[in-house]
Structure formats: C-alpha cells, structure tokens
Amino acid sequence: MLLDLDDPSLVADPYPVFAARRAEQPIAWDDGLGMWLAFGHAEANAVLRHRGLGRIWVDRLPLAGFESFNLIHRNALLEMEPPEHPRLRRLIAAAFARGHVERLRPWVEDLAARLVADLLEQAADGSAVDLVPTYADELPVAVIAELLGVPQADRPQLRPWSNSIVKMYEYDRPAGVESAAETAAADFVAYLRELAAQRRTAPGEDLISHLVSVRDTDGDRLTEDELVTTCILLLNAGHEATVNVTGNGMLALLRHPGELARLRADPSLISTAVEELMRYDSPLQLFERTAVRDVEIGPVTVRAGQKVAALLGSANRDPAVFSDADRLVLNRTDNPHIAFGAGIHFCIGAPLARVELQASFAALLAATASIELASEPVRRPEFVLRGLAQLPVTLAPSE
Ligand code: HEM
C-alpha cells in the first residue's frame, strides 16, 4: 500500500510521504486503494487534462434509499463529461459572468472587517479564540449564501447540510455517514426547489435568479434538477475548500513568522501569498478519474476501466516544477500550482475564492498587531478535504 489514508500520521503531515513516493515513481499503482496514484506535477496535471480519463457516472450507492444524494451527484457539473459538461458549464458561467464576483468584492471586504472586529472583541481580555468556527467557517458560507441570495434566516442550515453531504467523498466512511448524507441531500433539495420557485415568480439580482433565467444562444436552459444541483454544488464546492485554505494558510503563516512579518510589512504581496498558501498546504488533496480507453500517463499505461487519482497536494510540492518546493515563499511568482484543478473541470469559482481569501487574510492582518498560536491546532481526520477543526490563537489589535 502506497498511502494509508486512515493513518493519522499521514493526515497530520502527508508531505514527507508524498516526497518519498514521488521520488520512487511519479505515478504508481496502489493495491490498497485499487487505483493509480499520480504524485508528480506533470502526471497529476495530465490526469486532470487527459480526455481519455473522465468522470464516469455511476450511482455511488444503491438507488433505493439514496435518491436525493444520487440526484445531486448525477446532475453535478463536476461529475459530467462532454457533451453534457460544456453545455452546463456554459450556462453556469453565463450566469456567473453577470458581475457577481465584482459585485461582491466590497461586500466581502466589509464582512471580513466586521468578523475581525468581533474576533478582537472576544479576544480583548487576552483569551484564546478558535479561528476556525469564528472566522474561517463564517466568511465563505456567508459569501456563497449572499451570492445565491439565500435569505438570512435560512443561512445557519447551510453548513450542516453541506458538511453531511461532502463526507460522502471521503474513503472508509464510518457507519451513519451515508444515511446522514441522504437526509441532508433530501432536505437541501426540497429547500432549493422552493427557493427557485420563489425566484421564478419574483426574480432578484442574485445568482439563483440568474440561473433560473439563463439561456444560451440556442435557447437552452437549466433543468430544475440541474439548477438545484448547481446551487448545492456551489454551496459545497464553494465553501469547504475556502474554509480550509483559511485554516491551513493561517497555520502555515503562524509556523513561518518571518513570512508572516513580510506580508504584514508589505500587504501588496497578498495575491501571490494566497496562491502560495494554496500550493503549500492544498485544501483538496485527491481527485479521481476513470480511463475510458487505455491511456499513457508518464511511464505507465492506465488500462480502460482503471481508476487514477491526481494528488494535488503532492503535485504542488514537486521539486521538478517548484524551486524550494517545501519552503513557504509568499512572493513566489512562478507558481503553476494545481490546487484549483486543471483542464475542463478547472474551478469555476476560482475568481471568487481569490477575492474571499485575499480579503480574509488582509483583514485579519490589518486589524491585528500580532496573532499567535494559543495551543496546538487540531486537524480534521479526513484526507481528501484537508483542513483544521480548531486553530486557537491569541490576538493583539493594531494601534
Ligand atoms: C480555495 C477554494 C477552492 C478550491 C481550492 C477549489 C478547487 C477546485 C478543484 C480542484 C476543482 C476541480 C475538481 C476536478 O477536477 O475534479 C474545482 C471545481 C469546481 N469548483 Fe472549486 N475550489 C474552490 C472554491 C470554489 C468556489 C468559491 C466555488 C463556487 C463559487 C467553486 C465551485 C466549483 C465548481 C462548480 C467546480 C466544478 C467545475 C467543473 O466541473 O467544470 N469552487 N474546484
């Protein structure tokens, strides 16, 4: 077995294992996982881009009892291949293109400043605050909810729904996880059908209204199942990873005080800094594809029907592509990381994620004179969605 995804020491720090595997073979067969693992940057990149490797839709679970989960999986952009994928991607991109990201930028900056002010209040007596629930978790969910136009009163439901659903993408799921995911999916689908119906009769300037009304040049439009699934995908894809970049990234900064000081001294580094934090400790570690025909990736042949996974975090530390790959260098400019993926499924939310992350790190640093670890952070046990459960810090306000 090349990677034991259940091994807590692998989840704690997978990078030395990645380095060793990558040096042995940049792509290799893992008997335990029953798939090829692409550790190298060239190989992982090729896996994401190769048209002979695709998402092959199969219901993840027996249909009976998992109708809602399967529905939101089957209609998801992320799971589709041409010709369905470009059609849906074009429609969603057209709705997105209506200025949503730029419209949100000042709103996101205000929100980040407000959240930091609350944090500083909680930390005013010198007590530790946990940055994950109070900050990292709050901002991306609020942004996606605002983007979609989910009413304020309903927003607290979103995170628990999304959390339950995304656990299905881990390996070796504990008992109970699957039925919890189905219940969450059913409730979420019902909620969004209702919301979409409201926007159909009373449209606003939000993304749901635009997804309801978007048509391409042929007059094609989203079906209701596609619409509901797209909203769920945007909510899930749109915040889980962003939360984790905030946590992983802040921890990386705290462990590299010299780099943190450099960013404080020169806030214009924020955009290269965010890219580097995503490269250095990537929030999504593994994406799978299945070969539709025999495909050559680097030195190996992936046979038709075999699965192959791109290990993004490993690719992003490949010394063949990044100089000083294991060092955090916030002003790194030559940074072709693949934390947002590559090829036709390249993250559609990347511009929004960048706005959020830049605003979030910038607001935290601008409002504080110092941020220090108060106790050891706690990692979440999952390998694929790599993130922190707790990041306790003490904060001192800036003058
Ligand atoms: C730092 C935050 C984020 C990271 C690291 C990230 C990463 C990724 C990656 C790696 C993929 C490709 C998956 C694959 O090839 O199988 C992807 C796709 C996607 N992401 Fe993101 N994402 C982030 C934020 C967002 C946001 C904010 C949104 C929505 C507003 C979003 C929506 C999507 C969607 C809809 C797809 C599917 C695109 C397609 O299949 O064509 N993501 N993302």
Image (spheres, rainbow, N blue to C red):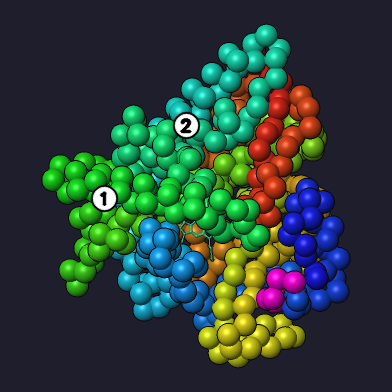
Q: Is residue 44 above or below residue 283?
A: below
Image quarter of the N terminus? bottom right
Disc 1 marks which residue? 193
Q: SS of the residue at dot 2?
A: helix
- State how far apart marks 2 and 1 are (Cα): 31 Å
Disc 2 marks which residue? 109
35 part of magenta stretch: yes
The residue nearer to you, when weighing 391 against 188, is 188
Q: Earlier in the sequence, mark 2 or mark 1?
A: 2
The image position of residue 42, as x and y in percent, is 69, 73
Instruction: Say what amino acid the circle numbered 2 marks.
Output: Glu
Q: Residue at x 34, y 51 (%)?
A: 189
Instruction: Say what amino acid the circle numbered 1 marks.
Output: Arg
Q: Residue at x 71, y 25 (%)?
A: 393
The image position of residue 366, as x and y in percent, is 60, 25
Among all residues in the image, which is located at the extreme left? Answer: 201
Left or right of 107: which side holds 385? right
The residue nearer to you, when weighing 99 against 353, is 353
Q: Is residue 353 visible?
A: no
Q: SS of the residue at dot 1?
A: helix
Image quarter of the C terminus? top right
| Mark 1 burial class by Cα count in 10 Å: few <14, some 14-19, many 20+ | some
| Mark 2 burial class by Cα count in 10 Å: few <14, some 14-19, many 20+ | some
The image position of residue 382, as x and y in percent, is 67, 51
Among all residues in the image, which is located at the extreme bottom? Answer: 294
Which region is colored magenta?
A: 32-37
Q: Residue at x 63, y 29 (%)?
A: 131
The image position of residue 323, as x and y in percent, is 79, 59
Left or right of 93: which side holds 246? right
Q: Which mark is residue 131?
A: none
Q: Residue at x 55, y 67 (%)?
A: 342
126 part of magenta stretch: no
